[in-house]
Image (tube, helix red, strand yellow):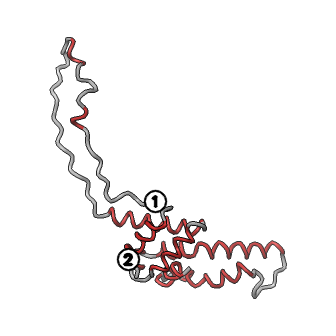
Amino acid sequence: MSFELQILSVSKIKERNLLKPANIAMNKPDTGVEIKNKSAYYVIRDCATIANDYIPHKCYSSLNDPIGSLTGQVTRDDIVDFVARAAAIEHTQQLLSIIFTDIYKREASDWTPPELPETEELEIDADADGDEIYGEYGYGDEDQEQTLVMPVDPPIDLGDHDAVVHKLVETFQAK
């Protein structure tokens, strides 16, 4: 969980300090309070569980430049552990997806689309008649075929553990 703790350490929102109390309330909801209603126990427990799971998401999204803020702050071991947990834990997988969305946006931000070739203006004779007026319809499109150029390499498969670790290590300049 040290990857998420690094996110909390660079965040400035007050909720970053809620992780430890949420962990306590998640495991023992009646800590420090007298429960007078059985339902309150479950409300406290479940709210604390949600807070525990999603505080890193909130802290990450509070950063103006999360990738820049975390660059050099995490280790390769932090990343390996994070990616391994993401394979088994849904909320960790969601955080990984959010991070990869930001990586893709960052890499695509410098991309400019290629210039399109100028198109020829066709002369159309509205009164044309004869057997050959339909002859080229649907043919010759091969000459006008254009190749789509992606702004950056396609996103990697988040199920490929090694590729994900490599990309995160590269992005965050982890050691």
Which residue: 57% across, 80% down?
15
Lateral position of residue 27 relative to residue 133, left or right: right
Give the residue number, with chain letter if any, for mark 2.
Answer: 68
Q: Quadrant of residue 140?
A: top left
Give SS at disc 1.
loop
Nearest to the observer: residue 39 or residue 110: 110
Mark 1 surroundings: few (<14), some (14-19) or many (≥20) residues within 10 A: few
Rendered image: mark on residue 166: none
Give the residue number, with chain letter if any, for mark 1.
Answer: 157
Q: Quadrant of residue 90?
A: bottom right
Q: In terms of sequence position, does the residue under pointer 2 or pointer 1 come before the other?
A: 2
User: Where's residue 79, x and y in %?
Assistant: 48, 76
Image height of 135 relative to 40, above or below:
above
Measure how far apart labels 2 and 1 are at the Cα level: 23 Å
Q: Quadrant of residue 136?
A: top left
Mark 2 surroundings: few (<14), some (14-19) or many (≥20) residues within 10 A: few
Which residue: 32% across, 63% down?
109
User: Where's residue 167, x and y in %?
Assistant: 40, 69
Nearest to the observer: residue 72 or residue 10: 72
User: Where's residue 81, x and y in %?
Assistant: 53, 76
Amino acid identity at mark 2 = Gly
Amino acid identity at mark 1 = Asp
